[in-house]
Amino acid sequence: MNWGCKWGLGPPSKHLKKMPKALHQLSPYLFLFLSLASLCHLSYGDVGTAAHYSPPYLPTACYGNDASQFPSNNLFAAASEGIWDNGAACGRQYLVRCISAVVPRTCNPGETIRIKIVDRAASSVSRPSSNGATIILSDTAFAKIANPSASSVNIEYQQF
């Protein structure tokens, strides 16, 4: 009988009998481990917090009073000291998504946004909704990923 194996090794049951006893005993555990591992989410970015801030947004530490610095979709942010990098963060773009919050169902599931850094959080004209956040999102950007009534959320972010 042909078992669909091009090397002609025969039925699978013959090969299981040849499997070392230790491996044969571990196979249910290996299957369980691989099954559980497939349920885990792999993270490719950093984890931090996001707050939001409201107008006025000008002047900014990156571009002063130049209103053309803001993306037309208003998805921009101010950087905390952790990502400010002595001003090198200006113009950088990040993918940001909400992963959790104190209040359940605050995050908008499946929403990932691309934001542009236009300011330094420490010197921003407007104060953030919560101190100590990694990224301070514009009101518009924050509302895309989370309920705008929240003061801060936990995020995953990655430079784009």
Image (cartoon, rainbow, N blue to C red):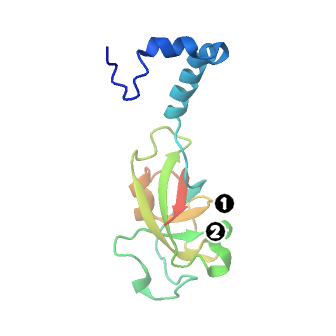
Q: Quadrant of the N terminus?
A: top left
Residue at x-position 39% and y-position 47% = 110
- Residue 81 spot, x, y in % from top left: 68, 69
**Residue 26 falls left or right of residue 153:** right
Residue at the front extreme, as displayed = 8
In the foreground, 125 or 80: 80
- Residue 31 spot, x, y in % from top left: 54, 22
Can residue 17 be seen here?
A: yes
Secondary element type, mark 1: loop
In the foreground, 40 or 71: 40
Amino acid found under the numbered disc labelled 2: Ile
Q: Classify mark 1: residues with Cα within 10 Å, few (<14), some (14-19) or many (20+).
A: some
Q: Is residue 37 above or below residue 102?
A: above
In the foreground, 19 or 61: 19
In the foreground, 127 or 109: 109
Q: Do callouts 2 and 1 mark residues in contact (Cβ within 8 Å)? A: no
- Residue 9 spot, x, y in % from top left: 43, 21
Secondary element type, mark 2: helix
**Residue 89 falls left or right of residue 140:** right
Can residue 53 be seen here?
A: no
Tell me the residue that label 1 is attached to: 132
Can you tell which quarter of the image residue 74 is in? bottom left
Residue at x-position 53% and y-position 60% = 158
Numbered mark located on residue 107 in the image: none
- Dot 2 or dot 1: first in sequence order is 2
Nearer mark to the viewer, of 2 and 1: 2
Numbered mark located on residue 83 in the image: 2
Residue at x-position 57% and y-position 14% = 18
Amino acid found under the numbered disc labelled 1: Gly
Q: Is residue 59 above or below residue 44?
A: below
